[in-house]
Structure formats: C-alpha cells, structure tokens
C-alpha cells in the first residue's frame, strides 16, 4: 500500500503542519520523510490528508490454484513465475488442510482437491488477450515446476468463491489463536523457515499453521492455544521462530509492525546502532515524547 501514497499532510507533535510529497510523480529532495512517516506506527505525527495513486480497474481477471505434493517445489515456483515476466495481483501460499477447514465452515468445498501445498495466483489484466497470454505462461511453467493439474477459475462466481474461502481462514484460526506473527525472509528461504517452524511445533507439541505471500517472503505464522501453557511458554516459541527467521536473513515483521507487544523482540533482534538512530529520529520529531510513547522501543 505504501507505494500508492504520493503525498500527505501531517501534524507533528509540536503542533506544526507539514506537507510531504504531493501530486508530483518524482521527488528526490533530501530524505524521504513521507515513507518514514508511513511506517512510524503513529509515533512521529498524525496524518490528516493523503494523496493516493489510483489504478484503472482491470477488465480481465483470473485465479489459478497450482497444487504440489512437495512444499519446496511449491515455493520455488513462485519466483519462477515472476522471472517469466508475470506480475500477479496476488500470489499466496496455502496448505490444503487449512483451506479445507475454512471451506467446511462455509459449507462449501475448496475447488482444488490435489496437492497438499498450493499457490493461489490472481491475475489482473487490461484485456482478455493479455490475460490469456499470462495464463499460458503460468500453465506452461507448472509442468516444468513439478505441479499437479492446475485449476483455472475464470468466471467471477468461481473467483469470488475461492476468495471467500481464503478470507475465512483467519476467522477460523482466530478462535484458538494466541498470536499471529508476520516474519519475512528472502523468498528462497520460505520453505526452510516453514520446515523450521514445523520442527519447533513438534518439539513443543503445539500446532503452528502457516500461510504466506509467496511473492515477497512474508509468512503469517499462527500460534494456537495449548492447554496449561502460560504467556511465557508462547513467547518462548515466538522467540525461537524469530531467531530462525533472522538466521535465514529475515526480519521479525514485514507488515504488522512492532507496536506494544513486540518491543522486547525489537530490542533483541534490531542492531543497537540502528535502534539508536531510530530513537534519535523519534526525539527530533517528538522532543516531548507525547505520541504513542510506549510503542516500538523498549
């Protein structure tokens, strides 16, 4: 979303009003304070106005579910799709047991019955001809990537049903959820991290479902409840997951941010020199520390 923000008006903690960016298409005047403000979790200022870049509504849409019997092959196929020059609207990694559970909640059936590990690719193009060309690239790649028979949903009804089931995954898991992490690793490391998470789950006797954005390495890791566990037990598991993500060249959050609850992990996994620079920026914007003073930094 941040790439669609072209400009903003913001009120600083000092009461001053500033404008960053605007309707211009290029801006390289000094530091990019607008992007800094977007990612600041409300600690640097209050955004009161924004200029957003709009895109035309695509006239042709399709959803392809690509099943695999091997997780590593599934996740290895994601960068290969991008290397083919295909730029999907979305590309997600799902596991069949999880989407089947969500489908049962809706009294429907997940349409792709083969392959425990699946990529869900949503394509959006300006014409049916362009959409067909992108579909052909992906379908051609599937066989080379070791996939089973892909499922192509072209009708609006089929696509909406798939999205409805996918959207139900989080509400279904949330009933027994203690926390959800959004670690990010290089896309080539996704399979290894998921395997490490499964091993952590086996060692502790806890279920840890994982879904993710296959194109950018961002994984949503769901920590489910276990009878008799305290918050310290869950935090120990989270710490092990974060440690593995960082070992694989990743970070502890790709989308959700630090907020209040992840401050202790920020202190452990962020370079102290970088933390010091961030605190200096906070002090420069907010010398009296009045905006969300308990967020991000321990």
Image (tube, grey):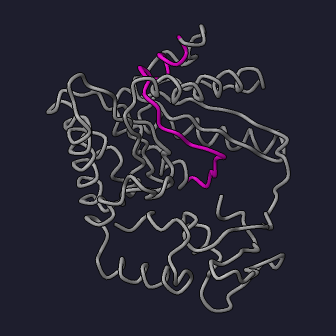
Q: Between residue 3 and residue 17, name the one nearer to us.
A: 17
Residue at left offset 70%, top offset 80%: 15
Residue at left offset 30%, top offset 59%: 265
- From the image, which quarter does the C terminus lie in? bottom left
Q: Between residue 30 and residue 176, name the one nearer to us.
A: 176
| Quarter location, residue 202 | top left
**Residue 100 included in the magenta stretch of the image:** yes
**Residue 249 included in the magenta stretch of the image:** no
x, y percent for residue 142: 50, 35
Which residue is outermost to the left?
203
Give the vertical position of 170 relative to 235 (above or below). above
x, y percent for residue 91: 56, 42
Residue at left offset 29%, top offset 54%: 245
Give the magenta-colored segment's residue range. Answer: 84-104
Horizontal side of residue 49 vs 158, given as left or right = right
- From the image, which quarter does the N terminus lie in? bottom right
Q: Between residue 89 and residue 146, name the one nearer to us.
A: 89
Give the vertical position of 143 relative to 28 (above or below). above
How many labels sit on residues? 0
Horizontal side of residue 39 vs 274, given as left or right = right
x, y percent for residue 118: 47, 30
Give the vertical position of 8 relative to 16 (above or below). above
Which residue is outermost to the bottom?
30
Horizontal side of residue 106 vs 25, given as left or right = left
| Quarter location, residue 121 | top right
x, y percent for residue 18: 74, 82
| Quarter location, residue 232 | top left
């Amino acid at each position: 979303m941040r790439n669609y923000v072209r400009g903003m008006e913001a009120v600083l903690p000092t009461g001053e009003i500033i404008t960053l960016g605007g309707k211009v298409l290029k801006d390289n005047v000094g530091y990019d304070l607008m992007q800094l403000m977007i990612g600041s979790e409300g600690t640097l200022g209050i955004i009161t106005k924004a200029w957003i870049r709009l895109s035309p509504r695509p006239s042709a849409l399709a959803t392809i579910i690509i099943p695999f019997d091997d997780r590593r092959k599934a996740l290895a196929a994601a960068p290969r799709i991008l290397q083919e020059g295909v730029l999907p609207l979305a590309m997600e990694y799902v596991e069949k047991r999880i989407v089947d559970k969500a489908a049962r909640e809706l009294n429907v059936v997940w349409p792709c019955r083969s392959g425990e590990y699946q990529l869900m690719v949503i394509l959006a193009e300006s014409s049916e001809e362009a959409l067909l060309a992108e579909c052909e690239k992906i379908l051609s790649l599937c066989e080379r990537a070791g996939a089973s028979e892909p499922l192509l949903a072209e009708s609006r009804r089929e696509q909406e049903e798939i999205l409805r089931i996918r959207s139900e995954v989080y509400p279904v898991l949330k009933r027994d959820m203690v926390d959800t992490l959004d670690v990010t690793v290089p896309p080539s490391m996704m399979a290894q991290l998921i395997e490490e998470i499964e091993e952590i789950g086996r060692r502790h006797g806890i279920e840890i479902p994982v879904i993710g954005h296959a194109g950018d390495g961002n994984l949503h890791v769901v920590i489910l409840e276990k009878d008799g566990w305290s918050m310290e037990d869950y935090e120990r598991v989270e710490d092990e997951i974060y440690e593995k993500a960082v070992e694989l060249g990743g970070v502890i959050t790709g989308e959700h941010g630090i907020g209040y609850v992840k401050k202790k992990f920020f202190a452990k996994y962020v370079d102290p020199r970088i933390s010091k620079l961030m605190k200096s920026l906070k002090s420069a914007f907010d010398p009296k520390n009045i905006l969300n003073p308990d967020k991000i930094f321990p």
